[in-house]
Amino acid sequence: MSREMIRQGGRSARIQAAVHAASRALLEQQDRSAITVPMIAERAGVTPSTIYRRWGTLSDLFADVAVERLRPAAPPADTGDTMADLEAYTLEYAEEMSSSVGRALLRDVIADSSDDAPMRCCTYTYDNLRLISDRAVARGEAPLDIAQVFDRIFAPICYHILFADRDVGPDYCRRLLAEVGRGDARRGTD
């Protein structure tokens, strides 16, 4: 995350938007190892010192850009059933994150030296799981044990995506979901 608080609107927001856009454009055009802060600054129309002051390092800037790209565009699907909602969300998450773009974004997030970017991404997932759980309660179903869902579904998926040691396709995700379903992922059930 940026080193200083970014105010909504105004000059700070315009600078952040310009730097993010320049970073995304350069990342699409060339290898990240060839990108420098001065290149981003020139493209964004700011000085390199502006980038260093706000983000500190190139890695932290890339992490901030990645977090914004990983922000969910829409809430998880509401299928009318908690486990079906969880399955739909898990399959979509694994598909997006295991793409080459998703994998690069995850790596950028993990590279954040302040640990703020990983926490923000974790919060996005937590908020979506909380929404699925809240819908369950509203339907009279047991809520999800969100910590267990994190530990038994999303942690293994992220690990295997980051280390590229296993396919995290639908079959794998459904096995994790089945194990969680058998292991009481919903509080109050046996």
Image (spheres, rainbow, N blue to C red):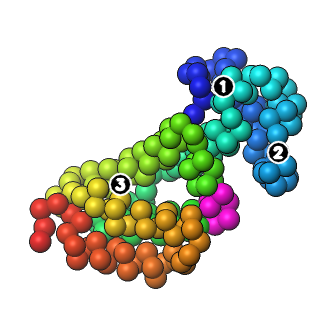
The residue indicated by pointer 3 is: 129
Residue in view at x 57 percent, y 68 percent: 163
| Residue 35 - label | 2
Circle 2: residue type: Ile
Give the image location of residue 189, x and y in percent: 13, 67
Q: Which of the 4 image quarters holds residue 147?
A: bottom left
- Secondary structure state at the residue bearing disc 1: helix
Q: Read off the magenta span.
A: 99-104
| Distance from the alpha carbon under mark 3 to that under mark 2 | 36 Å
Residue 43 is left or right of residue 53, and the answer is: right
Q: Is residue 25 above or below residue 8?
A: below
| Distance from the alpha carbon under mark 3 to that under mark 1 | 31 Å
Residue 91 is left or right of residue 2, and the answer is: left
The residue indicated by pointer 1 is: 54
- Secondary structure state at the residue bearing disc 2: loop
Q: Is residue 22 magenta?
A: no
